[in-house]
Image: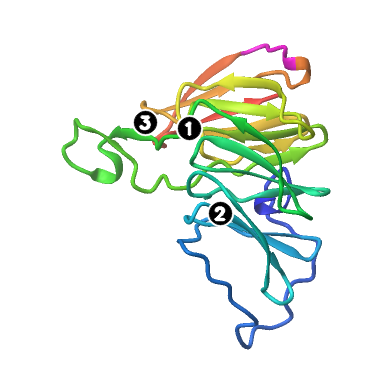
């Protein structure tokens, strides 16, 4: 999964390549590739702007299968056992069998959109709300034990049952959620776009059973993002 583990520590168990001397293989899709690849069980999984998720043999670079969605795939996949999980700009979150490339289930969110705000990246006119041209990633999922977590452009953070895609709980943040959740010590942390660029919001939500207890703290920052720890 994104950055190697649920906590996003960026630490990997493999030894890594001892040296780099040449290109071992390359694989061409029909669109731009913006997500990070995930390697599991000798297979590399990667999304593309051509609307496909690809499963590629990590040793030879040959295609095993590809899965077509309704729009570009810019989230980094997560793999648990024989299932790969990922989101698409078509507003669906998918679970696909890693062996056959067939869909196991799909969960439909309320839809995707880019974060929009005023004076983004210094763009003029200052008072006009504009979509962020750099908001081209989707939330990369995290799978921990009995739940798969991801954010959506519909403003929600979702926790789904990894077996059938049933909603365990969801939390509405109020704005676009395209960051990847990080899970540590029973708490889910997620960054959220906000139209108030000088505010950092924190919230706590119990993970189990969908019951929720929320506390809000407001901190001042120069960031255009909010942070929601969900526990």
Residue 14 to residue 118: above or below: below
Of discs 1 and 2, which sits in the foreground?
A: 2
Whether residues under marks 2 and 3 lie with C-beta atoms below 8 angstroms apart, the answer is no
Rendered image coloring scheme: rainbow
Boundaries of the magenta span: 210-214
Residue found at x 78% / y 19%: 208
Name the residue: 50% across, 57% down.
34
State the image coordinates of residue 177 (x, y, percent, origin top left).
51, 33
Instruction: Assess disc 1: are there few (<14), some (14-19) or many (≥20) residues with their C-alpha within 10 Å of its C-alpha.
Output: many
**Is residue 79 on the magenta stretch?**
no
Q: Quadrant of the C terminus?
A: top right
| SS at circle 2 | strand
User: Residue 27: image x %, image y %?
Assistant: 58, 72
Q: Which-is-in-front pick, marks 2 and 3? A: 2
> Image height check: is 230 above or below 28?
above
Q: Are marks 1 and 2 in contact (CB under 8 Å)?
A: no
Q: Which residue is mark 1?
A: 153
């Amino acid at each position: 999964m994104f950055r190697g583990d649920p906590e996003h520590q960026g630490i990997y168990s493999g030894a890594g390549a001892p040296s780099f001397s040449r290109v071992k293989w390359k694989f061409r899709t029909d669109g731009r590739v913006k997500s990070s690849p995930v390697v599991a069980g000798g297979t590399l999984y990667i999304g593309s702007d051509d609307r496909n998720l690809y499963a590629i043999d990590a040793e030879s670079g040959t295609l095993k299968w590809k899965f077509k969605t309704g729009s570009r795939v810019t989230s980094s996949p997560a793999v648990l056992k024989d299932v790969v999980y990922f989101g698409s700009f078509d507003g669906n979150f998918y679970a696909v069998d890693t062996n056959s490339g067939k869909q196991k289930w799909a969960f439909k969110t309320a839809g995707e959109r880019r974060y929009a705000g005023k004076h983004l990246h210094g763009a003029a006119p200052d008072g006009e709300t504009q979509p962020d041209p750099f908001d081209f990633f989707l939330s990369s999922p995290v799978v921990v034990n009995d739940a798969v977590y991801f954010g959506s452009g519909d403003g929600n953070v979702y926790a789904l049952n990894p077996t059938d895609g049933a909603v365990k709980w969801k939390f509405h943040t109020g704005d676009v959620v395209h960051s990847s959740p990080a899970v540590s010590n029973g708490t889910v942390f997620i960054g959220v776009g906000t139209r108030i660029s000088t505010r950092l919001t924190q919230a706590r939500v119990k993970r189990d059973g969908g019951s929720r207890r929320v506390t809000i703290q407001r901190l001042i920052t120069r960031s255009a993002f909010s942070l929601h720890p969900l526990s």
